[in-house]
Image (tube, grey):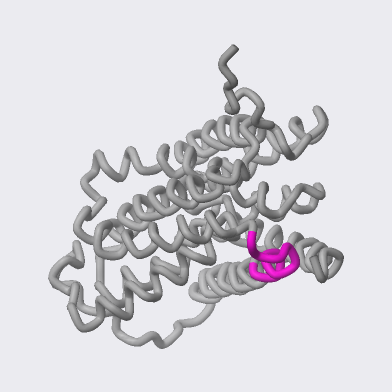
Amino acid sequence: MIDMPILAIDWSPLNASLGEYIFLGVFSFIFGIVAGMLGVALGVIRLPVMLALGFNPVISAGTNLGVSILGGTTASWPHWRSGRIVFRVVLVIGIPAIVGSFLGGLFADDVKSWMLLSVIAGILAISALSTYRQWYTTVRQPLRPIRHRPPPVITDPTGVSNIRPKRLAADSGLGVIIGLIGGAAGLVLGTLRLPVLLNVLRMDPRYAAGTNNAIGVLAGVFGFVGHAVNVNFDVAVIIVMGVTGMVGSYIGATQTGKVSSTLMRLIVAIMLTAVTPIVIIRAVAEYPN
C-alpha cells in the first residue's frame, strides 16, 4: 500500500473547541464589518485574539496569514476593476516584501516564542497609537483649524515616475525587513508600506490603497507558503474565520459612509489597546522558550 504522508498531516493543530470556533466566527464577522467600513485589514486584531485563547504563536501566525489572504483577495477585486492597482509599483515595492515575508514565515520556527510575541506586542502598540492619532485628528479638526504643511504635489498619480534608482536600494531593504517581521509574526503590515507609497512615490491615495492591498496579498501568500512548509497553519480556523470575515467585510463595504468612520477608528483603537497587554503577558509567560 502506497504511503501518503499528506493524509497524516494534522490539519487542525490548534485543537480549537466548538465554542472557540463559534467565538472566532462571530468575532471575525463583526470586525469584518468594521474592516469593510474603514477599508483596513483585520489581521492586527485577529491575531492577538487567537493568542488570547492560548493558541500556539507560530501556528496562529500562519493561520492569520491564511485568513488575511482570503480577505485581501476579496478586497483586491474592486481595486483591480477600477484600475487602482499599479503593477509596476507592485513589482518594485512588492518583490522585496515577498522575499522577506517568505523567509520570515519559513524560519519562524527558529524564533523563540517570547521574542515573536514581543514583536507582535510592539506592532500592536504602534498600531494602537497610530489609530488613536487618526481618531484624535478627525475629532479635533472640526473644533479648530490646524496648521498643516502643504500636501505634496502629485504630478503622477500612479507614482511610477517617482521611482528613483538611488532610493530603490533603501526602499527594497526596508521592504525586506518589513516582510521578514510580518511573515514571522503573521501580519501583512500594509500600514508600514502605505507611507512609502504616499510620501516617497507620492501616489494618489486611491492608487496607493489598491496597490498596497495587492502587495499585502502577495506578501501574505508567500508568508503563508513559508509557514506551510513547516505545516504551521490550521485549516479549520482559516475556513471559519476566513468565510465569516469575508461576509462581514462585504456587508461593511456596502455600509461605508452610513456609520461614522471616526467612531469605527475609536473602536479599533480601543480593541488594539485591550489586546496588547494580553500579548505582553503571553510573552512574559513564554520566556525563555
Which residue is nearer to you in this view: 201 or 170?
A: 170
* Residue 30 in the image, given as x and y percentages of width and height: 65, 40
Q: Residue at x 36, y 43 (%)?
A: 76
* Residue 152 in the image, given as x and y percentages of width and height: 26, 79
How many callouts does the rendering have? 0
- Asked if the magenta segment contains residue 243, the reply would be no
What is the span of residues highlighted in magenta in the rendered image? Answer: 110-119
Which residue is nearer to you in this view: 267 or 2?
A: 2
- Residue 259 is at least partly visible in this image: no
Q: Residue at x 52, y 61 (%)?
A: 104
Q: Is residue 75 above or below residue 99?
A: above
Direction top: furthest residue: 1
| Displayed quadrant of residue 262 | bottom right
* Residue 122 in the image, given as x and y percentages of width and height: 65, 72
Q: Residue at x 60, y 73 (%)?
A: 126
Direction right: furthest residue: 285
Q: Is residue 187 left or right of residue 194?
A: right
Q: Is residue 105 above or below residue 96?
A: above
| Displayed quadrant of residue 63 | top right
- Residue 155 is at least partly visible in this image: yes
Q: Is residue 145 left or right of residue 107?
A: left
Q: Is residue 179 left or right of residue 262?
A: left
Which residue is nearer to you in this view: 253 or 105?
A: 105
Please tell me whether the stretch drawn in magenta is mainly helix, strand or loop: helix
Direction front: furthest residue: 1
| Displayed quadrant of residue 14 | top right
Q: Quadrant of the C terminus?
A: bottom right
Q: Quadrant of the N terminus?
A: top right
Q: Residue at x 27, y 42 (%)?
A: 80
